[in-house]
Amino acid sequence: MYCARRVECYFVRMEQKRSDVIANQIEELIFDGTFRDGEHLDEMQLADRFSVSRTPVREALLRLAQSGLIEHLPRRGAFVRQPGPIELMEMFEVMAELEASAARLAANRISDHAIGELKEANQRCNAAVEEQNTEKYYGENEQFHAILYRESGNSFLEKECLRLQRCLQPFRRTQLRLRGRLKQSMREHELIVSALEDGDEIQAANASRGHVAVQGENFHHLMASLKTALKRVG
Amino acid sequence: MYCARRVECYFVRMEQKRSDVIANQIEELIFDGTFRDGEHLDEMQLADRFSVSRTPVREALLRLAQSGLIEHLPRRGAFVRQPGPIELMEMFEVMAELEASAARLAANRISDHAIGELKEANQRCNAAVEEQNTEKYYGENEQFHAILYRESGNSFLEKECLRLQRCLQPFRRTQLRLRGRLKQSMREHELIVSALEDGDEIQAANASRGHVAVQGENFHHLMASLKTALKRVG
DNA sequence: ACATTATTTCTTGTATACAATAATATTGAC
DNA sequence: GTCAATATTATTGTATACAAGAAATAATGT
């Protein structure tokens, strides 16, 4: 019986508080378009929807406001706040800079083992490209970048990279849909790895920056995918 | 009389909600050492101290937990969480990278007017050095960097820089106490400005990175100033 | 009829009450 | 006397109640 008790205890410890669960659910509802940009989020309605009181809903909203996904005006309430085209470009630019920094630092700090990991991740990426499996490519691509962040040897930088990556996730997806973009992306990955192997920090930084940066036709593509977001302006 | 009414209205609008005020006050109490690292922050005690109920205190604590200044464990409460020496070094490294990025972008985007602003800020810095007024230097130095962030032309990057700068503020202060550091810092500022004037993005980035990075004797000095933080380990 | 003001309603911000869990103290057995 | 199990206390998480401000609507005067 003590065993059952421990199991129960385990589940209890795993259980996060309701406000956290609700924050994630609201986030999900924003990402999949249930709540549109600029929409007012009523605390009472959300409380009813999740069958809780206003308190955890409110805490969730305040948390999301901190992360920038919603705007919380005093005495006015919470509003969905998707980044506009300009802010999005800016975020991609910062992401590119952070990736460049991570690569630059990694060039001097990366272990041979990690180089191996990157190559393996790249192989899995390649396999996904062969299979034309965009979804799989997307996951493996994330793995590749996660390793790079880690090998910067700076866990604070790693966290910042992951945070921003998470914000840009829904938009990055659209970028990869471009014809031939997957193969180009692969070549860039290989360029990064070889720069890291050579310990060439400048090359590693430039290759990483170029890989993430939104430029050329990608720019137009991204703008096109933002038509929905632009609606609110009109 | 309508005038008086408008004034009242103005003040009402300026008034932020209590939880925000409390968050800032708690932050202050942590920075000035009233609450030590690792200390448990009791919601009830804080509520009594500020003469409010637990609700706004709780919201403040959750906000501070998001910003990383305190740790909030489920069903355990809030604990002060000052960065340890390693994390601090990592944060300075990221700050250096962000500054470098801002400078690199600014090199291509900065206006002549802004160059003038930087030079003026530098002159005020110089005056502070002459007067041996560390406090004044500190403020003017912040101004200089704020202009640089702005001229990156990327307001998202600007915000990120200001956020991190704010976190590192109490530690940066100790760095400036080093003998002769002020004059060296001034030379570095001038180097940055001249690189920006030349539109030399590489030089601007390197100069900025070097200016912020903690290296050489500064490293030992920073570690020494962390003795208090290290106490908790012992 | 329109604009302005007063009132009402609705929503947020804060206080308090209750529930659930972790920390602490107490008691009993060895 | 010490350790373990249980009872107590204290603190957090959530629900509800109340207060205050903003939006919406009704009323009034021009």
Image (cartoon, coloured by chain):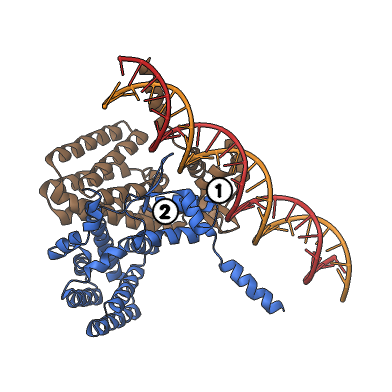
Chain colours: A blue, B brown, C orange, D red
**Mark 1 sits on what residue?**
B36
Task: Name the secondary structure under disc 2.
Answer: helix
Which chain is mark 2 on?
A: A
Q: Which amino acid does the dot numbered 1 rest on?
A: Arg
Nearer-the-camera pick, B234 or D25: D25
Q: Can residue B210 be seen at all in this image of the molecule?
A: no
Horizontal and vertical percent for residue B151?
Answer: 20, 45
Taking the spot 23% from the left edge, 38% from the top edge, the residue there is B122
Residue A84, label in figure: none
Compared with residue A217, is residue B199 higher up or lower down, i.e. above or below?
above
**Which quadrant holds residue A206?**
bottom left
Specify whether residue B171 is in view.
yes
- Up-down: is B14 above or below B151? above
* Residue at image point 40% right, 48% down: B167
Spot occupied by residue B194 in the image (x, y as percentages of width and height) = 15, 46
Q: Position of residue A197 (x, y in %)?
A: 25, 77
Quadrant that contains the N terminus of chain A:
bottom right
**Residue depicted at x 39% and y 20%:** B5
In the image, A223 versus B121, the foreground residue is: A223
Q: In the orientation shown, which residue stands out farthest toward the left? A: B198
Residue A192 placement: quadrant = bottom left
Chain containing mark 1: B
Task: State the residue position of label 2.
Answer: A64
Tag 1 secondary structure: loop
Nearer the observer, disc 1 or disc 2? 2
